[in-house]
Image (cartoon, grey):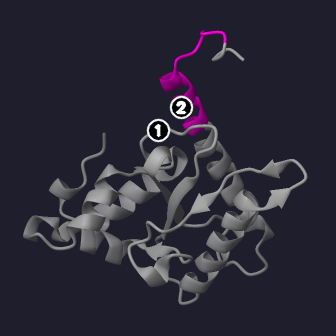
Amino acid sequence: VQYLAGLWTVEAISDELSALADTVLAAAIPEVWADMPKTHLPQPKIAIIGYGKLGGKELGYTSDLDLVYVYDDPHPDAPDIYGRLASRLTNWLSSATGAGTLYDVDLRYAPTVTAAFWPVQLKPLINTSAKVRGHGNINHSVALALSVAIPILAALLISCAKKFSPASAIQPN
């Protein structure tokens, strides 16, 4: 209503819609984790990277969420556990209800075709991204550099990335 009355700019609305999506994602992760039947940690070691409109803080009313799930957990069952978490979270966000769908979720930005519905382990992703200096996998490196980690989980992503990359490769804003 305030936008229609000219009190808010399109940029301000986009910022607020993006912040709302960040908040929803950050709040949903612990709820989905608590609902999981088999976990080995009290809190998941996962980050969500937002690409597209979410990553650029340009979310609109009908925008989808372009997401990649990244985990940093050496547990032997981690791929399955975080795969179930990602699947359940995506389902929570995109299920049709009587009130409608909260968000359409697009997972096609995952670094590999097989990772589309699975979270990506952090160390191999960072190692792939570090190849940009040697002109390795530039496409995903640039996408990773231009993406934004959901703020509440960004500290986890950055601290873990520093473990696996040269100091010059990770520059927090």
- Say left or right for 83 vs 134: right
Give the number of callouts.
Answer: 2
The amino acid type of the residue labelled 2 equals Ser
Is 15 contained in the magenta span?
A: yes
Q: Is residue 137 magenta?
A: no
The residue positioned 15% from the left and 54% from the top of the image is 168
Quarter containing the C terminus: top left
Q: In this view, does 148 lie to the left or right of 26?
A: left
Query: In this picture, is 144 found above or below 151?
Result: below
Tell which residue pokes out farthest to the right in this image: 98
Residue 151 in the image: x percent, y percent? 50, 44
Label 1, residues with CA under 10 Å away: few <14, some 14-19, many ≥20: many
Q: Is residue 151 left or right of residue 132?
A: right
* SS state under label 1: loop
Q: Mark 2 points at which residue?
A: 14
Task: Give the number of the disc on residue 86.
Answer: none
Q: What residue is pinned by disc 1?
A: 57
Is residue 39 depicted above or below 168 in this figure? below
Q: Where is residue 30 in the image (x, y as percent from the top left)?
A: 70, 58
- Extreme-bottom residue of the structure: 76
**Residue in the picture at 20% in, 66% down:** 138
Q: What stretch is highlighted in magenta?
A: 5-19
Q: Distance between the residues labelled 1 and 2?
A: 6 Å
Q: Earlier in the sequence, mark 1 or mark 2?
A: 2
> What main secondary structure does the magenta stretch of the protein show?
helix
Q: Which amino acid does label 1 sit on?
A: Lys
Q: Do the residues labelled 1 and 2 touch (CB within 8 Å)?
A: yes
x%, y% of residue 102?
Answer: 73, 50
Classify 40 as above or below 146. Answer: below
- Taking the spot 26% from the left edge, 73% from the top edge, the residue there is 127
